Image (cartoon, rainbow, N blue to C red):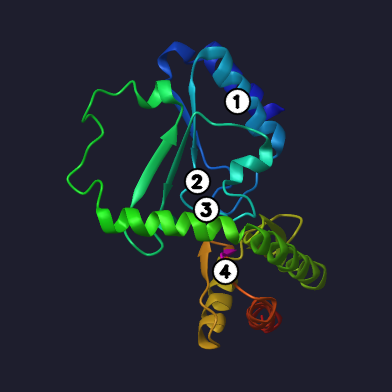
Amino acid sequence: MRCVEYIRDTFAIHLSPDEVAAIIIEPIQGEGGFIVPPKEFLQGLRRICDENDILLIADEIQSGMGRTGKMFAVEHYNVIPDIITMAKSLGGGFPIAAAIGRGDAMDSVQVGGLGGTFGGNPLSCVAALKAVDEAQQLLENAEKLGTILMDRLKEMYEKYDIIGDVRGIGLMAGVELVKDRKTKEPAEEERNRVLGECHKNGLIIIGAGAYKNVIRFLPPLNIGEELLNKGLDIFENAIARL
């Protein structure tokens, strides 16, 4: 895979792997536009890290906690990272973040080396434990409703030329709007109009992407089919009005 070979070329020409402590990735890009990499890419990164004694760190802050139908999105790629970062949904509304990883990696820091004045808040820790329990019980719903979500979005792709791409896993999906499917020119203005129309009709939805032309879908993991379809109807009506 070319993107994997590019990293190998970088190590061979520009940077010694001995100077690289870790490679940090999002299994599914969040703010970058909800881009889902092929399995071969993450598996190739895992091999590169193993060959060069480099840590592979998965940022699961947005994609973890059952969002994709598995506890962590990286599970879809049959890849085990050395460290996983978590936050946001981990606390069920309370502020908390965590890093979990291999024992040798986590123990390499001296005692107190990763401490902070806000660390170990008891209430946040209790909330996080409960959130983990709830997320594990909602994995099946996230997978089932995620299939419905993607099927509806793919149907819209076939109907509306302004939709240039639909991508995602589980209840983490992105719709990319383009002025032309061949040139892939970003439709930023149209994206903003769709967002505004959705907001006016009661659907809370926001954008993403480097070119500001992606609309993200992150419904609650406990959402029901009726409410999901109601939100998708509002979204489709906004697309149809362009």
In the picture of the structure, the residue carrying the numbered disc 4 is 219
- Count residues near mark 4 (Cα–Cα under 10 Å), then give few for <14, some for 14-19, many for 20+: many
Instruction: Give the residues in magenta.
Output: 215-219
Give the Cα separation between the discs numbered 1 and 4: 30 Å
Instruction: Report the mark closest to the observer, 3 or 1.
Output: 3
- Count residues near mark 2 (Cα–Cα under 10 Å), then give few for <14, some for 14-19, many for 20+: many
The amino acid marked with disc number 1 is: Arg
Q: Which circle's residue, 3 or 4, is located before the other in the chain?
A: 3
Q: Main secondary structure of the magenta part?
A: strand
Tell me, yes or no, if residue 195 can be seen here. yes
In the picture of the structure, the residue carrying the numbered disc 2 is 60
Quarter of the picture containing the C terminus is: bottom right
Helix, strand or loop at label 2? It is: loop
In the picture of the structure, the residue carrying the numbered disc 1 is 46
Q: Residue furthest left?
A: 117
Residue 188 lies in magenta, yes or no?
no
In the picture, the disc for residue 65 is: 3
Q: Which circle's residue, 3 or 2, is located before the other in the chain?
A: 2
Give the Cα separation between the discs numbered 3 and 1: 22 Å
Residue contact between numbered discs 3 and 2, judged by CB atoms under 8 Å: yes
